[in-house]
Protein backbone atom coordinates (compact mmCIF):
# COMPACT_ATOMS: atom_id res chain seq x y z
CA UNK A 1 0.00 0.00 0.00
CA UNK A 2 2.79 2.44 0.83
CA UNK A 3 4.43 1.63 -2.49
CA UNK A 4 1.26 2.70 -4.30
CA UNK A 5 1.12 5.98 -2.30
CA UNK A 6 4.81 6.71 -3.02
CA UNK A 7 4.26 5.90 -6.73
CA UNK A 8 1.20 8.21 -6.83
CA UNK A 9 3.17 11.05 -5.19
CA UNK A 10 6.04 10.58 -7.65
CA UNK A 11 3.56 10.57 -10.58
CA UNK A 12 1.90 13.77 -9.29
CA UNK A 13 5.28 15.47 -8.91
CA UNK A 14 6.29 14.26 -12.37
CA UNK A 15 3.04 15.59 -13.88
CA UNK A 16 3.62 18.93 -12.09
CA UNK A 17 7.18 19.09 -13.45
CA UNK A 18 5.92 18.39 -16.97
CA UNK A 19 3.24 21.09 -16.67
CA UNK A 20 5.77 23.62 -15.32
CA UNK A 21 8.23 22.74 -18.12
CA UNK A 22 5.51 23.23 -20.76
CA UNK A 23 4.57 26.60 -19.22
CA UNK A 24 8.21 27.77 -19.21
CA UNK A 25 8.61 26.56 -22.80
CA UNK A 26 5.60 28.66 -23.92
CA UNK A 27 7.03 31.75 -22.17
CA UNK A 28 10.42 31.22 -23.82
CA UNK A 29 8.71 30.91 -27.24
CA UNK A 30 6.86 34.20 -26.65
CA UNK A 31 10.12 35.84 -25.57
CA UNK A 32 11.95 34.58 -28.67
CA UNK A 33 9.16 35.88 -30.93
CA UNK A 34 9.37 39.28 -29.25
CA UNK A 35 13.15 39.33 -29.70
CA UNK A 36 12.77 38.51 -33.40
CA UNK A 37 10.39 41.46 -33.74
CA UNK A 38 12.89 43.73 -31.95
CA UNK A 39 15.88 42.61 -34.01
CA UNK A 40 15.57 45.36 -36.67
CA UNK A 41 15.27 48.02 -33.96
CA UNK A 42 18.32 46.67 -32.14
CA UNK A 43 20.30 46.65 -35.39
CA UNK A 44 19.30 50.26 -36.13
CA UNK A 45 20.23 51.29 -32.60
CA UNK A 46 23.58 49.53 -32.91
CA UNK A 47 24.22 51.28 -36.25
CA UNK A 48 23.30 54.66 -34.73
CA UNK A 49 25.63 54.07 -31.78
CA UNK A 50 28.49 53.14 -34.12
CA UNK A 51 27.86 56.21 -36.26
CA UNK A 52 27.74 58.52 -33.23
CA UNK A 53 30.95 57.00 -31.89
CA UNK A 54 32.61 57.59 -35.25
CA UNK A 55 31.32 61.18 -35.29
CA UNK A 56 32.67 61.81 -31.80
CA UNK A 57 36.07 60.44 -32.80
CA UNK A 58 36.06 62.61 -35.94
CA UNK A 59 35.14 65.67 -33.88
CA UNK A 60 37.92 64.95 -31.39
CA UNK A 61 40.42 64.59 -34.23
CA UNK A 62 39.21 67.85 -35.76
CA UNK A 63 39.52 69.64 -32.43
CA UNK A 64 43.04 68.37 -31.90
CA UNK A 65 43.97 69.38 -35.47
CA UNK A 66 42.51 72.84 -34.93
CA UNK A 67 44.37 73.22 -31.63
CA UNK A 68 47.61 72.17 -33.30
CA UNK A 69 47.08 74.65 -36.15
CA UNK A 70 46.20 77.37 -33.65
CA UNK A 71 49.40 76.67 -31.70
CA UNK A 72 51.43 76.78 -34.91
CA UNK A 73 49.86 80.09 -35.90
CA UNK A 74 50.45 81.51 -32.43
CA UNK A 75 54.09 80.44 -32.54
CA UNK A 76 54.43 81.95 -36.01
CA UNK A 77 53.01 85.24 -34.77
CA UNK A 78 55.43 85.31 -31.86
CA UNK A 79 58.50 84.44 -33.93
CA UNK A 80 60.51 87.39 -35.20
CA UNK A 81 60.33 88.00 -38.93
CA UNK A 82 63.51 86.90 -40.69
CA UNK A 83 65.41 89.73 -42.32
CA UNK A 84 66.38 89.24 -45.96
CA UNK A 85 70.08 88.82 -46.52
CA UNK A 86 71.95 91.70 -48.14
CA UNK A 87 72.60 91.30 -51.87
CA UNK A 88 76.28 90.77 -51.42
CA UNK A 89 75.66 87.73 -49.21
CA UNK A 90 73.24 86.12 -51.61
CA UNK A 91 74.81 83.45 -53.71
CA UNK A 92 74.51 84.56 -57.28
CA UNK A 93 70.91 85.75 -57.06
CA UNK A 94 70.07 89.01 -58.78
CA UNK A 95 66.77 89.58 -56.92
CA UNK A 96 66.10 88.76 -53.31
CA UNK A 97 63.07 86.61 -52.71
CA UNK A 98 60.59 87.85 -50.18
CA UNK A 99 59.73 85.44 -47.44
CA UNK A 100 56.46 87.17 -46.73
CA UNK A 101 53.64 88.06 -49.10
CA UNK A 102 53.01 91.70 -49.81
CA UNK A 103 49.96 93.15 -48.09
CA UNK A 104 46.75 92.97 -50.09
CA UNK A 105 45.84 96.36 -51.56
CA UNK A 106 42.95 98.16 -49.91
CA UNK A 107 40.08 99.10 -52.20
CA UNK A 108 37.64 101.74 -51.00
CA UNK A 109 34.24 100.26 -50.16
CA UNK A 110 35.52 96.67 -50.23
CA UNK A 111 35.88 94.70 -47.04
CA UNK A 112 37.66 91.37 -46.75
CA UNK A 113 35.33 88.64 -45.51
CA UNK A 114 36.89 85.55 -43.92
CA UNK A 115 33.94 83.16 -43.79
CA UNK A 116 30.19 82.80 -44.11
CA UNK A 117 29.50 84.23 -40.63
CA UNK A 118 31.36 87.43 -41.48
CA UNK A 119 29.47 87.69 -44.76
CA UNK A 120 26.09 87.37 -43.03
CA UNK A 121 27.08 89.84 -40.28
CA UNK A 122 28.30 92.32 -42.87
CA UNK A 123 25.05 91.97 -44.84
CA UNK A 124 22.90 92.74 -41.80
CA UNK A 125 25.16 95.63 -40.78
CA UNK A 126 24.72 97.15 -44.21
CA UNK A 127 20.96 96.66 -44.23
CA UNK A 128 20.64 98.34 -40.82
CA UNK A 129 22.95 101.25 -41.57
CA UNK A 130 23.70 101.91 -45.25
CA UNK A 131 26.14 104.69 -44.21
CA UNK A 132 28.71 102.02 -43.23
CA UNK A 133 29.16 100.92 -46.82
Image (spheres, helix red, strand yellow):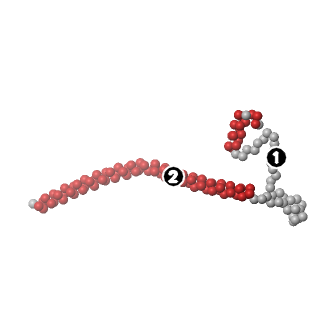
Relative to 94, does residue 130 appear above or below in the rendering? above
List x then y, in percent, for residue 82: 80, 60
Q: Residues within 10 Å of mark 2 (few under 14, many from 20)?
A: few
- N-term mark: 2 or 1: 2
Q: Is residue 64 left or right of residue 111?
A: left
Task: Name the element at disc 2.
Answer: helix
Q: Is residue 55 left or right of residue 122?
A: left
Q: Is residue 27 left or right of residue 98?
A: left
Which disc is residue 49 wearing? 2
Residue indicated by mark 1? 105
Disc 2 versus disc 1: nearer the observer? 1
Tell me the CA gap for discs 2 and 1. Answer: 51 Å
Task: Name the element at disc 1.
Answer: loop
Task: Identify the residue shown where x is 90% and y is 64%.
Answer: 88
Q: Residue furthest left?
A: 1
Task: Identify the residue shown where x is 86% and y is 59%.
Answer: 96
Amino acid sequence: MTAIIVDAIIMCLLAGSLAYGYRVSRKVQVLMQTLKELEPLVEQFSWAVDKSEQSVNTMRASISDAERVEKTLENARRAPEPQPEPRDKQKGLDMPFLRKRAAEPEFPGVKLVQDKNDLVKRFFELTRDPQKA
